[in-house]
Image (cartoon, rainbow, N blue to C red):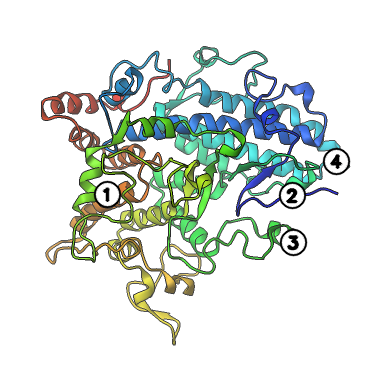
Amino acid sequence: MKKLYIYTLLCFFIILSSCQDILDVENKNGINQHNNYQTSTDLAINIVGIYSGIQEIMPSVILFNGLRSDEMGIDESASPQIRSIYNYMELSTNSYVDPTKFYKVIVNCNDFLKNANVFEQRRDEVSLKNYQACIGEVHRIKYWCYWMIAKIYGEVYIFDESFETDFEVQKIKDMTPFTLQEVIPELIKVLEDPSYHWDKKINWQQLVDEPKAIYNYYGIEHQVLLGDLYLWNKEYKKAANIFYKYLTIGSIGWGDLIGENEDLFGHQNYIQLYKKTIQTCGKKLIGVSEYNHKFEQYNSLYALFNRGEIIAGQGYLNIIESQKNTENSTGDLYRKFIDNENKIWKYNFEKKGFLNTLQNRIIIYKDSELYMKLIECLNEMGDSETALVLLNQGAQEYYDEDTKVFAPPFHKNNISDNGIWDEIWGMNSGIRQRVSLTPRVFPNEADDNKKQELLRQWILEENAMEFAFEGKRFEDLIRFSLREGTTNIIAQTVAMKYPESERNTIRSKLSDINNWFWPIE
């Protein structure tokens, strides 16, 4: 009988004969070659091969966002490669910067999409619905990877080829790349097309037998990715609608999965992340790259941070230490992921008091990111007052339990389909109240433009604390800079972490948008 061992909530489990077999695949590109698509287990193995590629790229995502921004600093012991990223120096031979590993994920997706159609006619092994779910899963990874490349390298090559031999970036350099701003509407167009089976979820029990090893992965959510793209494209109402729905009712498009597999997941609220509470605790993970050290999967960031090569940056320290908390002292006491020497311990799976597997993973998306992006959307739509309440104490103080009615500014909702806030938001306690920080307050004389300007800065600071060392900081600075049409946000923010004698040089470099991104060599 087919079995599936539940390892942790919201994990996808690929259960195969050996975890080492999963990662040591035959093709140099990272997954089995097309003539190995013979059984349902082969289908699973090749998807896992794609997952392993995500493990390889995520540390580079963290380093790009941390070392290029004010989030991370370096110690004297830092290697030349780390130092060159930090100091905006020559990067052409830097292994962390090499885009090949990103494009290999796409090549592997293309190989899968090209060859997995053998199962479309084999209904006895894989149902049509599950086959489509596998296709949807790989499409989600492929287009998410395009999005990551665009944000890190400033441009991206889009192609459907699945190269038969070992992939090299030079093989696609004769194509015309899309710039970051050009690719956003292109990706939106694809993600709005339902023919890609975006929201179907894989039934792993149908693919694999006799579990002997466990591979954990939280999938890329289609609606979350689409909402992110809408935000960058300044389609704030569309983005806000997605974030609001997700925070209100949980994952969009998973209802049929719950009903069919109630015994598998144990309860009806399996995917309803926000059904019982909307505390935005930051612990509800939506997309994760998992490294299970029990199977010798190690997050390389642990060694870099543990050795002290990379430490907390001065910008992050300034933001954390300047906060006023409700205990009549200064500093964010809940989100300080460093020790007394400013060493970063976020990915230290040996840290006492923390579950090992949690510390060894890299988060792709989590609920509080959607929450903060909802606040950002509301602010850009001109509703800074509502956005500020959600940032501070949340909607609960505006909700009457007896009448089930919200007081202004929550008496109407411009982003929901029915024009009202769902009553579940009556439990929402906001971000700053959750971590015992004093509320932000608009000055009495501030007009609407000033409120929006202030809240933009406060959102950037809150994000820096809430998503510290999770690969979000520099892309936040890029998004805000592009929105306001200025290089000053990045140039001024990042320059402040360097010695005063070096700041003008860094400001000058970052005044050129081409220097924001890593080069595709």
Q: Measured along the vertical axis of the image, is residue 345 above or below residue 252? A: above
* C-alpha separation, residue under disc 2 versus residue under disc 3: 11 Å
- Residue 507, quarter of the rendered image: top left
Q: Which residue is mark 3?
A: 263
Of 76 and 80, the residue lying toward us = 76
The C terminus: image quadrant? top left
Disc 1/disc 2 C-alpha distance (Å): 42 Å
Where is residue 445? Give x, y as percent.
11, 64
Q: Residue at x 43, y 72 (%)?
A: 427
Of labels 2 and 3, the one closer to you: 2
Is residue 134 visible in the rendered structure shown here?
Answer: yes
Q: Which mark is on residue 461?
A: 1
Name the quadrant containing residue 492: top left
Disc 3 element: helix
Q: Counting other residues with Cα less than 10 Å from the Cα at mark 1, is it few (<14), some (14-19), or many (20 or more)?
A: some
Q: Nearer the viewer, residue 357 or 275?
A: 357
Circle nearer the N terminus (4, 3): 4
